[in-house]
Image: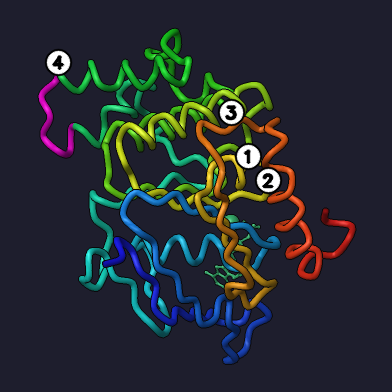
Amino acid sequence: MAKLEARNICKHFDSIQGGKAQESAISNINLSIKDGEFVCLVGPSGCGKTTFLNILAGLDRPSEGEVMLDGRPVVETGPERIMVFQENALFPWLRVVDNVEFGLKVKGVEKTKRNEIAMQYLEMMQLTKFADAYTYQLSGGMKQRVAIARALAIDPVVLLMDEPFAALDSQTRDLLLVELQLIWARTKKTIVFITHNIIESVCLGDKVIVFTKRPGTIKKEIIVDYRRPRLPEDEGLREYQRTILNELKGEIAAKDL
Ligand SMILES: Nc1ncnc2c1ncn2[C@@H]1O[C@H](COP(=O)(O)OP(=O)(O)OP(=O)(O)O)[C@@H](O)[C@H]1O
Ligand SMILES: [Mg+2]
C-alpha cells in the first residue's frame, strides 16, 4: 500500500484578473508514494508544485480528487506531515533555539530533552553559535537552515519540502544534499521535495516527477537508480539530468533555463 497517494487531484482558483471565472492551477495529478521513498518534483514556475504540496500537507483542499495517507483520506494538517516552506516561516519573536524547539514543546517533550534535540539539529545545520540569536539577525540561508532543523526535530513520518535549499550558498547546499540523504537513510522518512535545480533532484530523488506547465499535471516519472549517498558532481547522474532537462525543455521557455 502507498504511504501517500494523490488521486486525481485538481485545484481551481478564482481568476486573478477578477470576474467569476475559475482557472485550473493543477489538473488530474495521480501519484503514489511508497513508505520511505524520496520523491522530487520539478516543473516550470507557476505550474502548481506548491499548490500540490499544500494539498498533500492538508493546508489546502483540492477542488477535485483526494489525498490518502496510509489508506485514509487527508482532511487537515497533522504532526505526521511537516512542511518546510518556500519562504521561511519562523517566529520572529522567538530565539533560534526556541524556534527549533517549538514543535517539540507542542508535542509535550520536556525542556531538557527538547533542548538537547534542538541543539543536535542546530549543530547539523552549523548554527550552534546562533542558538540564542533572533531570526532578524540571520541571513536568508541561515533562516532556511533553522526552518529545516525545526522540521527535522519534530521527526515527522512525511516531510514535505518546498525548495528548501533555494536560498542557500552552493557550499552549504552541497553539504546539506549529503546530510539530508544520510538523515533520510537513517530515519526512513518519506520525503517530497520541490526544486528548480535538476542536479538537486537527481542527487536526492529515488524518483523525479516532471510537471507540465500550468495547469500542472505529471508529464514524466524518472526513476534514479544510482548508489547513495550521491554527490552533485557524480558523473553517473549526468544521464538522468539530461533526461529531465529534455522533458522540461518543452515546458519552459528557453530564457528560463
Ligand atoms: N490563492 C491563489 N489564488 C489564485 N491563484 C493562485 C493562488 N495560489 C496559487 N495560484 C496560482 O496557481 C498557479 C500555481 O502556483 P504555485 O505557487 O503552486 O506554483 P509553483 O509551481 O509552486 O511555482 P514556483 O516554482 O514559482 O514556486 C500560479 O499560476 C498561481 O498564480
Ligand atoms: Mg512554489
Q: Marks 1 and 3, Cα distance to the nearest angstrom?
A: 8 Å
Q: Secondary structure at mark 3?
A: helix
Q: Secondary structure at mark 1?
A: loop
Q: Which residue is mark 4?
A: 112
Quarter of image, res 24? bottom right
Q: Is residue 231 left or right of residue 233?
A: left
Q: Amino acid at mark 2?
A: Asn
In the image, residue 110 lies in the stretch drawn in magenta: yes
Q: Residue at x 57, y 91 (%)?
A: 20
Q: Position of residue 225 (x, y in %)?
A: 55, 49
Q: Marks 4 and 3, Cα distance to the nearest angstrom?
A: 28 Å
Q: Which residue is mark 1?
A: 166
Q: Amino acid at mark 1?
A: Ala
Q: Quadrant of ligand 2?
A: bottom right
As displayed, is residue 22 above or below residue 51?
Answer: below
As displayed, is residue 68 above or below residue 54?
Answer: below
Q: Which residue is mark 3?
A: 141
Looking at the image, is mark 3 or mark 2 earlier in the sequence?
3
- Label 3 crowd (10 A; few <14 / some 14-19 / many >=20): some
Marks 2 & 1, CB-CB < 8 Å contact? yes
Cβ of mark 3 under 8 A from ligand 1: no
In the image, residue 76 lies in the stretch drawn in magenta: no
Q: Residue at x 54, y 53 (%)?
A: 40
As displayed, is residue 90 above or below residue 192?
Answer: above
Q: Marks 2 and 1, Cα distance to the nearest angstrom?
A: 8 Å
Looking at the image, is mark 2 or mark 1 earlier in the sequence?
1
- Mark 3 or mark 2: which is in front? 2
- Label 4 crowd (10 A; few <14 / some 14-19 / many >=20): few
